[in-house]
Image: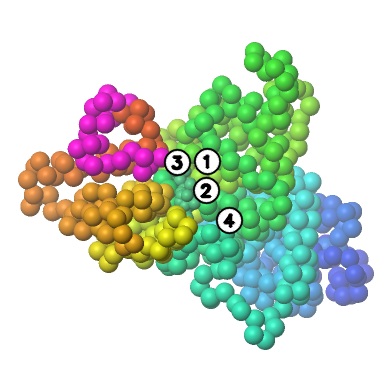
Amino acid sequence: MRPTTEMPEDGARRALNTSTTQRILIADDEPLFRETTAEFLREEGYECLCVEDANDAISVLEEHKFDLILSDLNMPGNLKFELLKEGRTKHSDVPMIVVTGAPSLPSAIESVRLGVTDYLLKPVKLEELLTAVQRSLSQAGNRKAIEQSSAPTPGDERASADTPAWSKDLGIIGESPKMLEVLEIVERVAMSDTNVLITGESGTGKEVIAKAIHCRSHRRDNAMQVIDCTSIPESLFESALFGHIKGSFTGAVKDQAGLLRACDGGTAFIDELGELPLSSQAKLLRVIQEQTFTPVGDSQSIRVDTRFVCATNRDLQNEVDAERFRHDLYYRLAVVHIELPPLRDRGDDVILLANAFLQKHQPAGVNPSSFAYETLECFRSYRWPGNIRELRNVVERSLALAKGPVIEASDLPKPLRDSINETPFETLDLAEVSRDEALDTADRAYLVQLLGKHHGVIASAARQAGLSRQGMNKLLKRHHIDANDFRR
Ligand SMILES: Nc1ncnc2c1ncn2[C@@H]1O[C@H](COP(=O)(O)OP(=O)(O)OP(=O)(O)O)[C@@H](O)[C@H]1O
């Protein structure tokens, strides 16, 4: 190991071996960053050892016990995240924070996969760094305490190796490989303070996953505040988020705290992020960068400690390319991106979900209902444009319509009954069908996606399609599409 200039004067090894204060390993090839960070953290009462590349850091870790690793990404010996991999495999109880001057989405995702508790960007404010250090150390302490108090005892009933027990506790249903992958990312990312972007079609469970991230995080005792971008008019965005003081504008009849203050210490769930107008995007970016904001009409700024989890069913990268969404905001919010698969790609999760909804909506005091085999086949073959929300509505409705305890395919809405014999649009051999049939299939696919985007609101879907409300209703009727299946 090459000696480093920043070791404590009496020799890092000796000092580190005998001290009882918390010890931080700083690995960074920028001398100025190493020196200023170490000096600052020492003043805060930590012991620091600095190294300038990943190989040195790995050797030092073999000989000394550390409480935290502060790691650069682009430094010698770290081309393939060697230091984070070493930390994850051999020192999994030591929290790791990345501080990088060359951030990128892939490196952020890989860092989170490798278990970092924070991913900070240079230049980092020293107070921000200190908060991250304190938080990581306290989480690691809590984790150790929990592990000690819940050490397995013989005969302990454990959750299955695949589905985490916590997801069942939160009412999340899904055992398909794609959902297990999502749950694993939730598990890894929850304890860090990284911002997360959740994408997926309407009704795939984006809010459910956002809640899971909140409930699995150290913020769970504080609020998760839902901020729905479609329900806040552009002109009121600032006041809704940051609050206002009485008299600051016409209609401000009393002081209002704003949504962000309600989730101080908690999570802000920004839903329908893709609908946020550009002017509001600039305001949101500022608060994310600075974690401070000023209520409308006030001169005092307020500091909040909030994690941002956002959701959209739009392709935000496309929106960025089309300059409708700020790339710097996208970059800040999509540090980790979770893509929820549509229900049709989750295999037999559809059956698990249908049975769960059946149980839930079953009226008390009657014989329990079940699904006929053909009904389950319809569930499997239907494309579920409204995803899990649509499935829930279908189960609830067919339960009410069923004449006996068995829900038959004839109790299902027509598109579901037809789905067994239907050729999905993308596999339709256009040369083999009539022009009318091809156009009809395309028309149906268009309407389904349009209603998904507009959450079943016929007026706005009609506006986008250039149709009157009546015209849209007629079309929906012809295709046996029920707009309610897309409502939230
Ligand atoms: N994995 C799941 N297990 C059980 N219920 C689920 C699951 N995912 C979603 N749901 C249920 O499906 C419905 C829709 O979920 P949610 O509102 O989270 O979807 P969304 O993707 O946020 O929808 P939108 O894009 O319209 O906002 C809710 O009733 C939710 O409880």
Judge: label 3 CB < 8 Å from ligand 1: yes
- The span from disc 3 to disc 1 (Cα, nearest Å) is 12 Å
- Up the image or down, 233 lies above or below 272; here it is above
Q: Earlier in the sequence, mark 4 or mark 2?
A: 2
Tell me if mark 3 has few (under 14), some (14-19) or many (20+) residues whose alpha carbon lies within 10 angstroms of its own: some
Where the N terminus falls, by quadrant? bottom right
- Up the image or down, 406 lies above or below 338; here it is below
Residue nearest the viewer, comparing 234 with 348: 348
Q: Element under label 3?
A: loop
- Residue 488, disc: 3
Foreground: disc 2 or disc 3: 3
The residue that mark 4 highlights is 212
Task: Give coordinates of residue 351: x percent, y percent.
Answer: 37, 63
Q: Earlier in the sequence, mark 2 or mark 3?
A: 2
Residue depicted at 86% across the width and 60% down the height: 46
Q: Element under label 1?
A: strand
- Residue 207, disc: 2
- The span from disc 1 to disc 4 (Cα, nearest Å) is 15 Å
- Type of the residue with mark 2: Glu
Q: Is residue 333 visible?
A: no
Q: Are marks 4 and 2 in contact (CB under 8 Å)?
A: no
Q: Give the colour scheme shown.
A: rainbow
- Type of the residue with mark 4: Ala
Judge: label 2 CB < 8 Å from ligand 1: yes
In the image, which residues are magenta? 463-488
Residue depicted at 14% across the width and 45% down the height: 438
* Left or right: residue 320 compared with residue 295: left
Q: Is residue 475 magenta?
A: yes
- Up the image or down, 334 lies above or below 248; here it is below
